[in-house]
Image (tube, coloured by chain):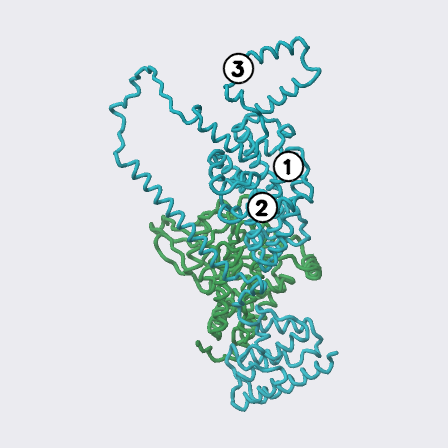
Chain colours: A cyan, B green
């Protein structure tokens, strides 16, 4: 890291100001970051599409969960771009080999639902710390305070708002002649094209929000490091050094006076051991040992007692009429809060388990989407095949005659009528479930020539009388209808190509 | 299973002839509009009230007057206005100085066929005055319940535009109407015939019902209503009618569905339609044909569908196509 090449002005900033810096960075680098996001997200999306069995809702959930996978490269790119380095495609594999997948795992597992991900990812991914060192580092960095939490919360809200805006824009701006987007299906539907539109819109929103989220978290991290490590002072000193080393800097007389003053003051401001210390280039182990030495010195860790006088204010004494809390109340409240926290945690785990179980019932990625069980009754036109008889159309006359021999006129006529509807469907007119006998007949009259209607009309009338008026047809009529039906189906078979 | 009664045969045939004659007679005055005439006649036979809705000038009032003329009964007409009082409809008690006692003065509602023209122009108070008469066939004046003569049928009209200064009928009153019949524009040929008839030897633009003659007496109408009510209905058809109404309650896009009175109305209307068609039994076709007119005024669409301009008939079309019919 070469601070001299940093692209932003380093100065002490508040955390909210740090967010502004992050958004400014995201705006500046939006296009490369956005392209990079799609380059990393597209392969993931394709793999997830197959793994989730082309279920839109599961696919979106998987992509949402794998967001850190796409944010890592953005963070890496931004961290290099900040110091004027251009991270080409060839450098990415090196980075991955340097242990990034291992560092990303926590963010894809237990830290996925953490609200400080934007701030902690730079710590883990860029500094490569783990274990105790990482914990210590997070403590020093103060976890970013509360701002990363709010960043995540506001980010989620922005995602939803952008998503809904996008859907509403599509809904209102698509011309009426085109298929209408069903908003309810887009949000909650399964498998419909509208739900895929909703999911793709959400994916687009992910890609827009991600650069801002990553850069804002990274800027928070930079702000905190600037505070802790005084980058601004370091840069100021470096600039001063550069100015001093420049030949056309101060006038020769002034430079000479400054040098004299520095030599005179140096013994007074610099401790003797520091003055005596040479400036070797230290390796990390030596530096660590040196730091430990310095920390063990008398300037650190010592306790100093000072005494001073302070006026005793009357206001410091508790007023007599001020309410006094019962002695056990604070501990009771603490205990209650702890119990409540654990109850909420257990409840949340329970809900997650329950949802997982519910989703796992339908999750068969290797089989494709499971067909929803059809609870509607089978179409009467197809009832012939699905009936208990399970007979083919060619076997109908035999079955009808068998019914007639058994004096089952109702069974015979019902079979003949169902067979007629089945045959009617083969001739062309569709027979929807909601169509009545009259409508079936009307559809046939409308769509077929008179000669192709066969015995449909008298058959329908006879069936209606039997079914709704309980007037049984005569055997002669049934025989006649059966003969006409046979001629009808044979004629149709003969005329078929 | 409920066993339908024996086919009355001749009685049904005769009833269908009388109703066909009634339709023909009404068609003399109202050219075209066959479905509207059929639905009105069905309501007449089923003993139910009709709400006629249509744009101005499509023949709503003419239809009601022609029906009244074809049925030889007592006909009254009330033009509903914003200042119409309930007593103007039902009647009131007035003091007779000669006999020195209160005398009941019966309002125009005491008739066989009442035409309530532009019923939504009167305030809710006056509209509600008809509730008791429509449902219980009686009117209470000064604490005395006065029965209305049978048959008693209300034909009310309203137009769907010009909502300024109108009072939409409350749901409770809408539910009292057996059918809500839409009177739409006639097609080209019908309109040509209508214009020819209305201008040939006709002075002014008054409604011409001079060609309509009484073909059915009130007693005969009561007999026809009795025949219709006894018409056989298989359990599967009854089940279909109830399933249709119940499906409308939970249907997507319907905020408030029809109540059980709608099921009753649908069955009555289906019986009327079967009789008008000359059938001695009710089929699912009768139920399905009468379903829109029976249900359209008994359901309330959700706000989003109303904003998008959907009408109850659009939703009912989907519902009727989706609810399986009892074919086999």
The answer to which of A77 and B160 lies nearer the viewer is A77
Residue furthest right in the image: A497
Give the percent coordinates (x, y) of residue A30. 65, 38
The answer to which of B108 and A113 lies nearer the viewer is A113
- Between disc 1 and disc 3, whose residue precedes? 1
Query: SS at mark 2?
Result: loop
Give the percent coordinates (x, y) of residue B300. 51, 54
- Between disc 2 and disc 1, whose residue precedes? 1
For label 3, the residue is A267
Q: CA distance from mark 2 to mark 3?
A: 47 Å
Give a yes or no on whether discs 2 and 1 share a subunit.
Answer: yes
> Which corner quadrant of the image does residue A490 belong to?
bottom right
The image's mark for residue B91 is none
The image's mark for residue A80 is 1
Q: Kindly tell me whether residue A277 is visible in this rendering.
A: yes
Q: Residues within 10 Å of mark 3 (few under 14, many from 20)?
A: few
Q: Mark 2 falls within which chain?
A: A
**Relative to A36, residue B255 above or below:** below
Give the percent coordinates (x, y) of residue A123. 54, 38
Disc 2 and disc 1 in contact, CB within 8 angstroms: no
Q: Residues within 10 Å of mark 2 (few under 14, many from 20)?
A: few
Q: Would residue A96 be found to the left or right of residue B71 on screen?
A: right
Query: SS at mark 3?
Result: helix
Give a yes or no on whether discs 2 and 3 share a subunit.
Answer: yes
Q: Name the mark nearer the viewer: 2 or 3.
A: 3
Q: From the image, which quarter does the C terminus of chain B lie in? A: bottom right
The answer to which of A469 and B133 lies nearer the viewer is A469
- Between disc 2 and disc 3, whose residue precedes? 2
Q: Residues within 10 Å of mark 1 (few under 14, many from 20)?
A: some
For label 2, the residue is A99
């Amino acid at each position: 890291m070469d601070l001299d090449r940093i692209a932003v002005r380093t100065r002490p900033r508040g955390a909210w100001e740090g967010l502004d810096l992050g958004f400014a960075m995201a705006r500046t680098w939006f296009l490369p970051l956005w392209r990079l996001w799609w380059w990393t997200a597209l392969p993931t999306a394709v793999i997830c599409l197959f793994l989730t069995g082309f279920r839109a809702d599961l696919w979106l959930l998987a992509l949402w969960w794998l967001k850190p996978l796409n944010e890592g490269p953005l963070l890496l790119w931004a961290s290099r771009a900040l110091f004027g380095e251009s991270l080409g495609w060839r450098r990415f594999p090196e980075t991955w080999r340097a242990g990034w997948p291992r560092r990303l795992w926590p963010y894809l597992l237990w830290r996925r639902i953490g609200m400080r991900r934007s701030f902690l990812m730079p710590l883990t991914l860029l500094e490569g710390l783990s274990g105790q060192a990482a914990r210590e580092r997070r403590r020093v960095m103060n976890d970013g305070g509360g701002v990363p939490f709010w960043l995540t919360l506001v980010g989620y809200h922005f995602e939803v708002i952008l998503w809904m805006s996008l859907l509403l824009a599509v809904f209102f701006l698509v011309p009426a002649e085109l298929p209408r987007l069903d908003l309810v299906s887009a949000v909650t539907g399964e498998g419909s094209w509208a739900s895929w539109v909703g999911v793709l819109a959400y994916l687009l929103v992910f890609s827009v929000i991600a650069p801002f989220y990553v850069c804002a978290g990274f800027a928070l991290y930079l702000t905190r490091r600037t505070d802790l490590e005084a980058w601004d002072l370091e840069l100021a000193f470096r600039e001063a050094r550069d100015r001093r080393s420049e030949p056309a800097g101060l006038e020769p007389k002034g430079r000479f006076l400054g040098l004299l003053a520095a030599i005179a003051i140096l013994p007074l401001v610099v401790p003797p051991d520091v003055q005596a210390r040479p400036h070797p280039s230290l390796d990390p182990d030596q530096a660590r040992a040196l730091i430990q030495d310095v920390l063990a010195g008398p300037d650190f860790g010592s306790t100093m007692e000072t005494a001073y006088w302070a006026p005793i204010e009357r206001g410091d004494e508790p007023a007599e009429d001020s309410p006094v809390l019962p002695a056990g109340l604070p501990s009771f409240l603490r205990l209650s809060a702890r119990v409540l926290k654990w109850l909420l945690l257990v409840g949340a785990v329970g809900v997650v388990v329950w949802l997982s179980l519910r989703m796992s019932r339908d999750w068969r990625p290797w089989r494709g989407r499971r067909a929803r069980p059809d609870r509607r009754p089978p179409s009467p036109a197809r009832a012939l095949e699905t009936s208990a008889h399970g007979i083919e159309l060619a076997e109908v006359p035999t079955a009808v005659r068998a019914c007639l021999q058994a004096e089952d006129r109702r069974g015979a006529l019902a079979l003949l009528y169902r067979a007629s509807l089945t045959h009617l469907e083969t001739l062309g007119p569709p027979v929807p479930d909601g169509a009545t006998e009259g409508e079936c007949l009307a559809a046939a009259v409308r769509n077929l020539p008179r000669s192709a209607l066969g015995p449909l009309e008298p058959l329908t009338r006879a069936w209606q009388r039997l079914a709704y008026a309980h007037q049984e047809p005569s055997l002669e009529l049934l025989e006649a209808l059966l003969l006409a039906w046979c001629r009808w189906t044979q004629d149709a078979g003969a005329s078929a190509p | 299973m409920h066993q339908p009664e024996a086919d009355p045969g001749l009685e049904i045939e005769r009833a269908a002839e009388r109703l066909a004659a009634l339709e023909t007679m009404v068609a003399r005055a109202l050219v075209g509009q066959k479905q509207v005439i059929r639905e009105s006649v069905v309501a007449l036979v089923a003993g139910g009230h009709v709400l006629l809705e249509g744009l101005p000038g499509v023949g709503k009032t003419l239809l009601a007057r022609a029906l009244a003329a074809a049925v030889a009964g007592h006909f009254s007409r009330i033009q509903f206005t914003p200042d119409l009082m309930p007593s103007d409809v039902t009647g009131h008690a007035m003091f007779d100085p000669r006999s020195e006692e209160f005398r009941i003065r019966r309002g125009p509602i005491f008739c066989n066929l009442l035409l309530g023209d532009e019923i939504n122009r009167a305030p809710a108070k006056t509209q509600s005055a008809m509730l008791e008469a429509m449902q219980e066939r009686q009117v209470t004046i000064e604490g005395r319940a006065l029965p209305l003569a049978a048959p008693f049928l209300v034909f009310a009209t309203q137009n769907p535009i010009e909502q300024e200064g109108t009072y939409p009928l409350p749901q409770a009153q809408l539910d009292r109407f057996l059918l809500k019949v839409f009177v739409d524009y006639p097609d080209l040929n019908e309109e040509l015939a209508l214009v020819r008839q209305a201008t040939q030897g006709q002075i002014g633009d008054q409604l011409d019902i001079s060609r309509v003659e009484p073909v059915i007496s009130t007693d005969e109408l009561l007999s026809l209503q009795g025949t219709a009510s006894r018409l056989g209905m298989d359990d599967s058809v009854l089940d279909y009618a109830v399933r249709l109404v119940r499906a409308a309650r939970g249907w997507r896009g319907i905020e408030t569905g029809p109540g059980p009175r709608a099921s009753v109305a649908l069955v009555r209307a289906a019986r009327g339609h079967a009789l008008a068609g000359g059938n001695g039994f009710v089929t699912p076709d009768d139920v399905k044909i009468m379903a829109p007119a029976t249900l359209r005024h008994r359901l309330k669409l959700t706000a989003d569908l109303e904003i998008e301009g959907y009408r109850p008939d659009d939703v009912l079309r989907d519902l009727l196509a989706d609810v399986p019919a009892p074919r086999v």
